[in-house]
Image (spheres, rainbow, N blue to C red):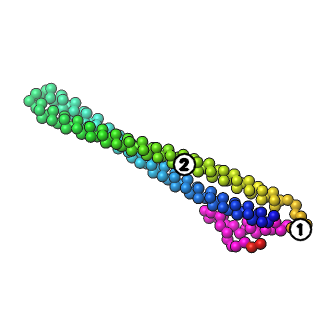
Amino acid sequence: MTDRIVKVMDRIVKMTDRIVKMTDRIVKMMDRIVKMTDRIVKMTDRIVKMMDRIVKMMDRIVKVTDRIVKVMDRTVKMTDRTVKMTDRIVKMMDRIVKVTDRIVKVTDRTVKMTDRTVKMTDRTIKMMDRTIKMMDRIVKATDREPSKTDTHTSIVVFRKYFNAIDCTSSSCKFIEEFHF
């Protein structure tokens, strides 16, 4: 009986180590998701600034065309300026297209990482359920009435084994070697 308890406790320690590792991975992925969302926010800010510039340039173009109507002598110079401004607008539109492509890629990555995080969380929940079931089995095994042969040795062994585990840190570790 004590061998079973020791094996089950070993399994529990291994499972808790796995749970700690998985939660560390989940935390890292959440950090990555936060960084990617920050990038998305910065890129959208850039797009907004570029759109503001385009609006200002369009206003300038309107003013320039009004001057062309009023002053026919300066028509050539004004049309040159208009051509330059439209070139700038085309370049800015190209930049906006590139930035939106980047945002789409980053959003796809964020979605994939979120899916991974959900899967890992599901695994962690399953492992926690298994650990709880194993602990219930141990409690049931130690709560039964002792036979004449074992005379409470299984309960004593269980308590010694449990006291030999340190779960204060991020993962449970043995404080000292356990001998039967």
Q: Residue 20, how many percent across, how many down?
A: 61, 58
Q: Pointer 1: what residue?
A: 149
Determine which quarter of the picture holds residue 134.
Answer: bottom right
Is 151 on the left-hand or right-hand side of 53?
right
Q: Residue furthest left?
A: 73
Let me know if residue 148 is in the magenta part. Answer: no
As displayed, is residue 153 above or below residue 30?
A: below
What range of the chain is rendered magenta? 152-178
How many numbered marks, from 0 up? Answer: 2
* Of residues 43 and 25, the one drawn nearer to the viewer in this rendering: 25
Q: Could you tell me residue 7's position as x and y percent?
A: 73, 63
Within-10-Å neighbours for mark 1: few <14, some 14–19, many 20+: few
In this view, 103 is above or below 175? above
Residue shown at the point (52%, 55%) measured from the top left = 28
- The reply to whether residue 158 is visible in this rendering is no
Amino acid identity at mark 1: Thr
